[in-house]
Amino acid sequence: MDQRQFTKTLRQNMTDAEQLLWKHLRAHRMSDHKFRRQQPIGPYIVDFVHFGQRLIVEADGGQHVDSDHDAIRDAWLRSQGFTLLRFWNNDILHNTNAVLEAIWHAMHTDTPSPPTPLPQGARGGTP
C-alpha cells in the first residue's frame, strides 16, 4: 500500500483517543490554529501536526512503550525542526483537559527563533 492510501486508511480507522483529540483540534478549535491529522512528513505519518508552530502531537497506545522505531522517528522529525508531544491514549481519554492544556501551552510558549544569517559583507570573511 502506498503512503497516500495508507494515510487515508489511518484517517478512516482512528482510535478512540485519536477521534477524541481530533474533535478538539479540528476546524481551528484550538485557539483558532489549524491542525492536520494523519499527515505524511518525509517517510513518516504523524497523528496530528500544526505546520505553523512546527508542532506534532502523537496519541500512543501500548505498542509504543520503549519503541526503538519511535526514537529514530522522533529524532528525524526533531531534526526537521518539529517539536513532538506524546500522550498515552489513556490520558487523552481520561484526562482530556490536561492534554489539551499541555498542547495549548506548547503552542503559546515562546521558543527562540533560529538566528538570522548575517549579510554577506558582515560575516567576517571576504565577500
Image (tube, helix red, strand yellow):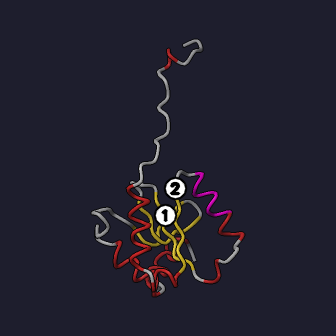
Q: Nearer the viewer, residue 7 or 20?
A: 20
Residue sitting farthest toward the top: 126
Region rendered in magenta: 72-79
**Amino acid residing under circle 2:** Phe
Q: Which residue is mark 2?
A: 82
In whole angstroms, how far apart are the C-alphas of marks 2 and 1? 7 Å
Where does label 1 land, which residue?
56
Residue 86 percent location from the top left of the image: 54, 70
Which numbered circle lies on residue 92? Answer: none
Per the image, label 1 sits on a secondary structure element best described as strand
The residue closer to the viewer here, 41 or 35, is 35
Q: Quarter holding the N terminus? A: bottom right
Other-residue count near label 2 (Cα within 10 Å), few / some / many at <14 / 14–19 / ≥20: some
Against 19, residue 56 (above or below) is above
Specify whether residue 75 is painted magenta: yes
Q: Are marks 2 and 1 in contact (CB under 8 Å)?
A: yes
Query: Where residue 64 sits in the image (x, y, percent)?
Result: 64, 77
Query: Residue at coordinates 45% horizontally, 87% vertically from top-left?
Result: 16
Name above or below for residue 13 compared with residue 121. below
Q: Residues within 10 Å of mark 1 (few under 14, many from 20)?
A: many
Is 49 displayed left or right of 2 in the figure?
Answer: left
Q: Is the residue 16 above or below the residue 98 in the image?
A: below
Q: What residue lies at 67% left-to-right and 65% top-to-bottom? A: 71
Residue 43: % across, % down: 59, 63
**Residue 25 occupies which quadrant of the picture?**
bottom left
Residue at left offset 57%, top offset 66%: 44
Residue kind at label 1, given as amino acid type = Ile
Residue drawn at x 39%, y 82% is 20
The kind of secondary structure element at disc 2 is loop
